[in-house]
Amino acid sequence: MERILTYGNISTIDFGNSASATIYKTEEGSSCFFGNGNETSDATISFQGESYVVPAWSVTILPDCKNEAYNTAKITTQTSMMVKKPNEAEDTPSTLKWSWRPENMDNFLLKGKGESTQTQLCDQKLVTNDQSDYLWYMTTVKFKKRDPISGKIMSLRVNSTAHVLHAFVNGKHIGNQHAENGKFNYVFEKDVKFKSGRNVIALLSITVGLANYGAFFESKPAGITGPIFITERNGDETIVKDLSAHKWSYKTGLNGFENQLFRTESMSKWSVEGVPFNRTMTWYKATFKAPLGNDPVVVDFMGLGKGTAWVNGNNIGRYWPAFISSENGCDAKCNYRGAYHAEKCLTNCGESTQRWYHVPRSFLNAE
């Protein structure tokens, strides 16, 4: 159909009730598309002496304008059921032996040192330029000893559009928060005790993939859009400082990525003692023998929090099995009819978005 579609003259026929035909015609022949935009009723179209049934909300393709070759509502797919078997390689332990090391964040948490500075809060996409999921926002706040708020418990309030936000004050992790159910505007607020003199506020914004469809998807904010306030805790709330126009320092990525801790030849020191659980900003490493045979290999990430995984230096993707989808929204009577929207035909309600990750055999070492 390529030549007819690219060189043909186009004409249309309206059959009413949202049914229509589009004809592409050249001297060599013609091709037709029958469309039915009705969401509930099938259409019967009479065309050139023949009768055609076009299901609701579908398109029929007739390469010669006579014989139906394809209809979008009559698609049949081949489904393969993969059976997962345990790793039966010789001498494979039942549990993996892990080593670990912390992410080095001293330059960010204690020094507030980044790569660039702005006297405003910037959208994460503009700063990272798609180089990383991670962006540090850092600023310094100074209080004099005679300042009446010095030593008092204050509140740090961050208006955020980060998919995940971690907040640190003077090197201490004060909390984290993430967007839920697609609502990327939220307020993070925690009590903080600032000291007299210099205080470093470091905010780590994390994205978990960006929207790639819909109107103006490229303009949707990501990161920390602000405003950011330090507020008093008692009585009627009084804004003490608006940090939005402060001097902010920015750093893209994590040190572990830059130092390539995920590479097998990494010379960084790892500890096998006291492997921590539920610890933020931590790298973990283990070894295993390649499963026997040539079948596809998968790894089960259930039990992990959020992060990125590598096998022999090869990135196999982001994971976040600890994030559970909403219990509501799945409908056993899913129907293809009608316009598409993000909440249509949801599956796996109340489960992780992904648990099993494919590891290509080419990533594995034979020994």
Image: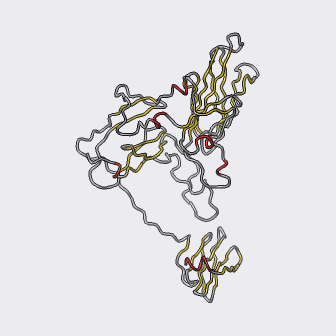
For this orientation, the residue located farthest to the top is 146
Number of marks in picture: 0
Outermost residue, front direction?
A: 116
Image quadrant in which the N terminus is located: bottom right
At 68% from the left and 30% from the top, the residue drawn is: 228
The one nearer the camera, 264 or 353, is: 264
Looking at this view, is 227 or 251 the one in front? 251
Residue 299: percent from left, percent from top: 38, 46
Residue positioned most to the bottom:
49
Residue 125's spot in the image, x, y percent?
61, 43
Q: In the figure, 105 relative to 211: above or below?
A: above
Residue located 57% across and 21% down the image: 170
Q: Position of residue 30 (x, y in %)?
A: 59, 84
Q: Looking at the image, what colour scheme do you see? A: secondary structure
> x and y percent of residue 319 in the render?
47, 43
Quadrant in which residue 24 is drawn: bottom right
Q: Nearer the viewer, residue 58 or 149?
A: 149
- Dividing the image into 4 quarters, which one contains the C terminus? top left
Residue 50 position (above or below residue 323): below
From the viewer's perspective, tell me whether residue 317 is left or right of residue 97: right
Please report the residue visible at 64 percent of the width from the left and 15 percent of the height from the top.
197
On screen, residue 317 above or below 333: above
Name the residue at 27% across, 48% down.
366
